[in-house]
Amino acid sequence: MKKKSILLSVSILLVLFLLIWAKPLLTQEKNTVSVLSGVLKLTGSDQEFVKYDEDTGLLYYISETEADENLLTSLPVLKGYTLSDQMGSGYLFTQKENPENQVIVSGTQFSRYYRLWKIPK
């Protein structure tokens, strides 16, 4: 009985320590559960980008940090667009057929292994 209570106490302390240690990661984004599900989908697949969320005006994708922004054009939502310019963490994409039609994609670093992308619909 004493061994079980010690094991339970150590387990609770370990979980609390991990939660405190990972707090900045868990509170970085407003919808952490979707981001973490995107991380799981990405690690379980061979895709470069995985869509993890969407709302009325934006699509949210996640990639590994090493993924090149030029690979963004492989996403179905950006087919027909080319990378024109980079402005800080924003990337300007121009439509090939209509150069006046432009889209700005923003990228945010999420931990050192993953990058989050916001793409307008």
Image (spheres, helix red, strand yellow):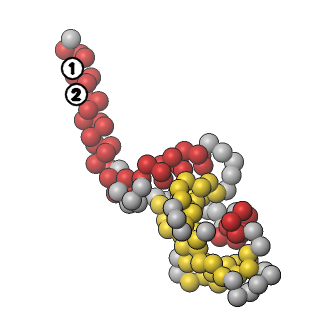
In percent of width and height, residue 38 lies at 54, 50
Q: How many other residues sit within 10 Å of disc 2, few (<14), some (14-19) or many (≥20)?
A: few
Q: In front here: 120 or 87?
A: 120
Residue sitting farthest toward the left:
2
In percent of width and height, residue 19 lies at 31, 45
**Tally of numbered discs:** 2
Dividing the picture into quadrants, the one containing residue 66 is: bottom right
Task: Label 2: state its secondary structure.
Answer: helix
Which image quarter is the C terminus in? bottom right
The residue at 22%/22% (across/down) is 6
Q: How many other residues sit within 10 Å of disc 1, few (<14), some (14-19) or many (≥20)?
A: few
Pointer 2 residue: 9
In percent of width and height, residue 69 lies at 65, 70
Pointer 1 residue: 5
Task: Label 1: state its secondary structure.
Answer: helix
The residue at 69%/48% (across/down) is 46
Dividing the picture into quadrants, the one containing residue 84 is: bottom right
Residue flagged by tag 2: what amino acid is it? Ser
In percent of width and height, residue 47 lies at 68, 52
Query: Does residue 118 show up?
Result: no
Query: Does residue 105 show up?
Result: yes
**Horizontally, is 15 left or right of 102 in the view?**
left
The residue at 27%/40% (across/down) is 16
Q: In front here: 15 or 102?
A: 102
Q: Are marks 1 and 2 in contact (CB under 8 Å)?
A: yes
Q: In front here: 101 or 17?
A: 101
Which image quarter is the N terminus in? top left
**Horizontally, is 58 left or right of 29 in the view?**
right
Residue flagged by tag 1: what amino acid is it? Ser
Dividing the picture into quadrants, the one containing residue 18 is: top left
Q: Say if 42 sits above or below 5 in the image.
A: below
